[in-house]
Image (tube, rainbow, N blue to C red):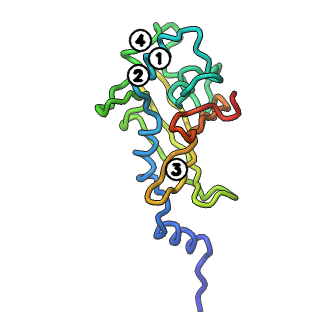
Amino acid sequence: MKSIPLSLVLLTLVGCGGGLSPDDARPLILEAVTISPALLDEVTRAGAAFHPATASDFPFSFLVLLAPIQEDSDDWRSLRAPDAPSLSPREIWIDTGTGRLTLIAPEHLTEVTVDEEVEGAEGVVSGSFRWRRPNFVEARGTFRARRTEDAWEIVELGLPAAKASVALRKDGTWGLVDGR
């Protein structure tokens, strides 16, 4: 009798049991990185008083914009010329057509991987994604997704280049993990 490798059995079970595929993760990531125009207005009005650790909502897009990343790496590469002028808000934010704003449009998302289930957390998987936004940045993000009764939801997004991540709170807002 021929034996079947355990990894093939597990892959089959995950695939048949409602596991999260990269194709299924793409729209979840794209939705999770959006913000409301009202939140952007609130932060703009706060100006210098805005602080990530005390913000009522600090989504992934803010982490990307405010992270103190000093040098390029495999996880982050600036696509802006050193002498290029700063991008205007109109150049930074993309209207999704759903009443939300984003830094990452579908065509910018170049790769999504879904890893195995997170140890000790049933129904939670981790993964990563890469995006390339012309004249801005090429970067890698990480995510954790949790299976609810009938769907998957992104519950954490990380920016490895900044060694920081944000997590979805029970009230639907995002906050820095460990308040960093």
Q: Are marks 4 and 3 in contact (CB under 8 Å)?
A: no
State which tag comes first along the sequence, 2 or 4.
2
Which label belongs to residue 88? 4
- Where in the figure is residue 129, as x and y percent of width and height? 51, 42
Q: Secondary structure at mark 3?
A: strand
Q: Is residue 160 above or below residue 152?
A: above
Give the labeled residue for mark 2: 38
Q: Give the mark toward the camera: 4 or 1.
A: 1
Q: Secondary structure at mark 4?
A: loop
Locate residue 55: give its quadrant: top right
How far apart are the two marked residues, 3 and 1, measured between alpha carbons?
Answer: 34 Å
For the C terminus, the image quarter is top right
Callout 2: 10 Å neighbours few (<14), some, many (20+)?
A: few
How far apart are the two marked residues, 3 and 2, measured between alpha carbons?
Answer: 32 Å
| Residue 142 visible in image | no
- Identify the residue at image location x=48%, y=47%: 112
Q: Secondary structure at mark 2?
A: helix
Callout 4: 10 Å neighbours few (<14), some, many (20+)?
A: few
Callout 1: 10 Å neighbours few (<14), some, many (20+)?
A: few
Q: Are marks 3 and 2 in contact (CB under 8 Å)?
A: no
- Where in the figure is residue 68, as x and y percent of width and height? 64, 19
In the image, 170 versus 16, the foreground residue is 170
Amino acid type shown at disc 2: Ala
Q: Is residue 27 left or right of residue 153?
A: left
Q: Give the mark toward the camera: 4 or 3.
A: 4
State which tag comes first along the sequence, 3 or 1.
1
Amino acid type shown at disc 3: Thr
Give the labeled residue for mark 1: 42
- Identify the residue at image location x=38%, y=17%: 91
Q: Are marks 3 and 1 in contact (CB under 8 Å)?
A: no
- Identify the residue at image location x=52%, y=67%: 14
Amino acid type shown at disc 1: Glu
